Amino acid sequence: MFSRSFKAKRSPVIRYTLALGLTLIAATTLATSSAVAGQPGAKTSTFTAEVWADNWFALYVNGKKVGEDSVPITTERSFNSEKINFTATYPLTIGLMAKDYTENASGLEYIGTDRQQIGDGGIIAQVRDNKTGKIITVTNAAWQALVLSKAPLNPSCVYSSNPTVDCKSSTITAPANWSKSGASPTGWTNASVYTASQVGVKEGYALVTWNPAAKLIWGSNLELDNTVLLRTNIKAP
């Protein structure tokens, strides 16, 4: 008497079904991992931002600072345009921190001279997607604005011989993650638009070929708003 062992054979249909199932599981896992790690199908591109400011700015994209004015804010007369290249992934949140030059918290400039005065701000920007060559955003009234520093609250102090004491001011801290998508809109308003003559555009402004839709913007008070946050959101194309 003897025994014979048998090995069960899988039919071609069963083998094919198992292979197909494993392939589908692997594909689903990969897709899920991609969704967790980032945005499925998110589009990354290189961009060029052109910015002119009176007097200084820093540029943020999706919460990260990607460039700033090459002339320090401590420079009394700083009028120049900048071109900043960066890489980012859609959707985009573009943020600008813009500052008008002031000597101190009084909000004045040329203190102690016969030119002692309240300065004024103003900024204009446009951003181009270098892959498509298209301008994807320009500064306009649709941008949001939040004033961080305002002075003087009593403009008549411009005639004071001791403006550091006599001029009043207000300052708040920049909200956390203000230049990221989903940041709180509390306290933000639409940016105000100004003409070139109102801002008094100077050196560097004419060196850029501005899109006709690009506007000079700032807070609601061109003279008293000294530090302003500005932002806009751009959907994936």
Image (cartoon, rainbow, N blue to C red):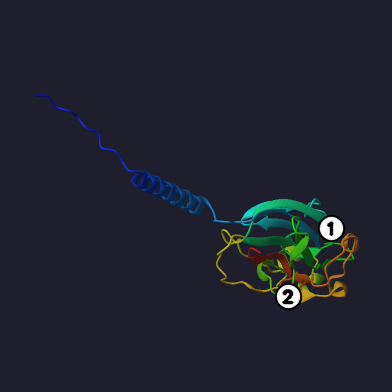
Residue at 84% x, 66% y is 210
- Which residue ends up furthest to the left in the rendered image? 1
Q: As displayed, is residue 9 above or below residue 195?
A: above
Residue 123 in the figure: left or right of residue 188: right
In the rendered image, which residue does mark 2 sit on? 192
Residue at 41% x, 48% y is 20
Residue 107 appears at what percent x and percent y?
75, 65
The image quarter containing residue 102 is: bottom right
Residue 214 appears at what percent x and percent y?
79, 70
The image quarter containing residue 225 is: bottom right
Q: As displayed, is residue 144 above or below residue 95?
A: below
- Which residue ends up furthest to the front in the rendered image? 1
Total marks placed: 2
Q: CA distance from mark 1 to mark 2?
A: 21 Å
In the rendered image, which residue does mark 1 sit on? 81
**For marks 1 and 2 on the same chain, the one whose residue lies earlier in the sequence:** 1
| Front residue (pair 182, 218) | 182
> Does dot 2 land on a helix, a strand or a loop?
strand
| Front residue (pair 169, 231) | 231
Label drawn at residue 11: none
> Does dot 1 land on a helix, a strand or a loop?
strand
